[in-house]
Image: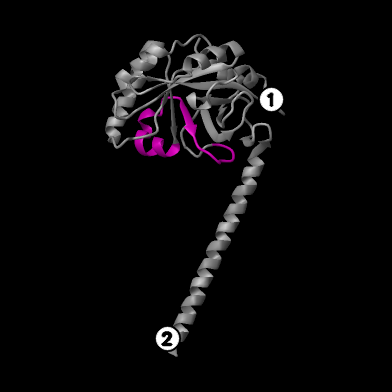
Amino acid sequence: MASKKKKKKLSWFIFFILLIGSGLMLFFGIRWYLYYRVATIYYPAFNIPIPKKYMIHGIDVSRYQDLVAWEEVKEMEDQDIKLGFAFIKATEGIGNRDIQFKRNWRRTKKAGIIRGAYHFFLATKDGKTQAENFIKTVDLDKNDLPPVLDVELTYGVSHDKIRTEVKEWLDVAEAYYGVRPIIYTNIDFYTKVLGDDFDDYPLWIAHYHQPGKPRIKRSWVFWQHSEEGRVNGIKSKVDFNVFNGDSTDFKNLLIN
């Protein structure tokens, strides 16, 4: 009999804990949802909610978006949102070049879209040779965005080694183009791998499903807030980004 009473008490205790846990999850879930709704506006044409309070919006593309009709991208508008810039994948590792880069690079400029080029970093390869691959591929002109290093995977390489090779890429690119490169990564990689060694570089941060801004303490210039966007002239889904500043700040970031 005593054993049955203990089991009954234990069952009620577990039920009580689960009830409290479910209530807290529901409370914080509703709270996050309401905050998300307040901080974003859903744009049907783009098929995503877009954070409020940002003036300048853009996308990033690679060969995975196939052939892009950049004139249609430029002309697209939903309410008060137009796309003002595009980051384009140029290179990867020590010898790979994106098969759509030349076409995208040429046609974004022709369409009147501010363009930027990025390199996808392979941690298993040395930074200098990777930077040379990018430099051989990308000619940056006046009013282009600074070069971008996309670094987000370790491939089992030590963090110290990654930081060394990343710094090498950044130094070589900066010496050649005469402008400080932008680092693209996600919050987890920046915090755990790069750390504060690169806090003086402009940051393009990826952090999805956040209501008003990415949850990172340091300053940032671009925020990739969604990978589910739809844009006229692009058949597949595309990443959406905002610039953290006004038109004057944006102009000052461009190569002069």
> Which one is nearer the viewer's eye here, 19 or 132?
132
| Amino acid type, residue under disc 1 in the picture | Glu
> Which one is nearer the viewer's eye here, 177 or 234?
234
Residue 206 magenta: yes
Q: Is residue 182 left or right of residue 115?
A: left
Closer to the chain start, of discs 1 and 2, is: 2
Can residue 254 be seen? Answer: no
Residue 160 magenta: no
Q: Is residue 166 left or right of residue 228?
A: left
The part of the chain drawn in magenta is 187-213
Q: Are marks 1 and 2 in contact (CB under 8 Å)?
A: no
Above or below for 100 versus 80: above
Residue under label 2: 3
Helix, strand or loop at label 2? It is: helix
| Amino acid type, residue under disc 2 in the picture | Ser
Q: Where residue 203 appears, x then y in whole percent?
A: 46, 28
- Specify few, some or many for label 2: CA neighbours under 10 Å numbering under 14, 14-19, or 20 or more: few
In the rendered structure, find residue 142 and report the number of the disc placed on it: none
Can residue 29 be seen? Answer: yes
- Specify few, some or many for label 1: CA neighbours under 10 Å numbering under 14, 14-19, or 20 or more: some
Q: Is residue 133 left or right of residue 237?
A: left
The N terminus - image quarter: bottom left
Q: Where residue 232 appears, x then y in whole percent?
A: 64, 25
In the rendered structure, find residue 77 and report the number of the disc placed on it: 1
Helix, strand or loop at label 1? It is: strand
> Which one is nearer the viewer's eye here, 104 or 186?
104
